Image (cartoon, helix red, strand yellow):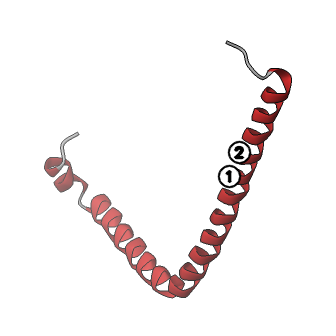
Amino acid sequence: MVNGGFAAAFLAFAVAALVIMTLMFGAAFVAARAQEATVKRIEMSAPAIKKWGGALLVGVGVWFVALASFANFFAGLYPV
């Protein structure tokens, strides 16, 4: 059942370690490159994101003010 002994086991371990190490470095490199590309795309679209985010924030604020101002109406509309 056991063939090869210590040398074969050590070689199998070394090959497995080398493959895992290569895959880890490759995954880290791919993630770093993807991150750079993503950051560049976000920087290009940041003004639009800020504009729409601000509009959304104002809309949510108006909704909260409406909920607070007309609490009795909304309590009947949305029973808890």
At label 2, counting other C-alpha atoms closer than 10 Å, the crowd grade (few under 14, some 14-19, many 20 or more) is few
Amino acid at circle 1: Leu
At label 1, counting other C-alpha atoms closer than 10 Å, the crowd grade (few under 14, some 14-19, many 20 or more) is few
Q: Is residue 77 above or below residue 7?
A: below
x and y percentages locating residue 13 in the rendered image? 77, 33
CA–CA distance between discs 2 and 1? Answer: 5 Å
Q: Is residue 16 above or below residue 5?
A: below
- Per the image, label 2 sits on a secondary structure element best described as helix
Amino acid at circle 2: Ile
x and y percentages locating residue 4 in the rendered image? 78, 23
**Residue ID at (68%, 67%):** 32
Count of marks, rendered view: 2
The circle drawn on residue 23 is 1
- The residue singled out by tag 2 in the image is 20
Q: Is residue 15 above or below residue 62?
A: above
- Per the image, label 1 sits on a secondary structure element best described as helix
Could you say which is closer to the camera, residue 39 or residue 65? 39
CB under 8 Å between discs 2 and 1: yes
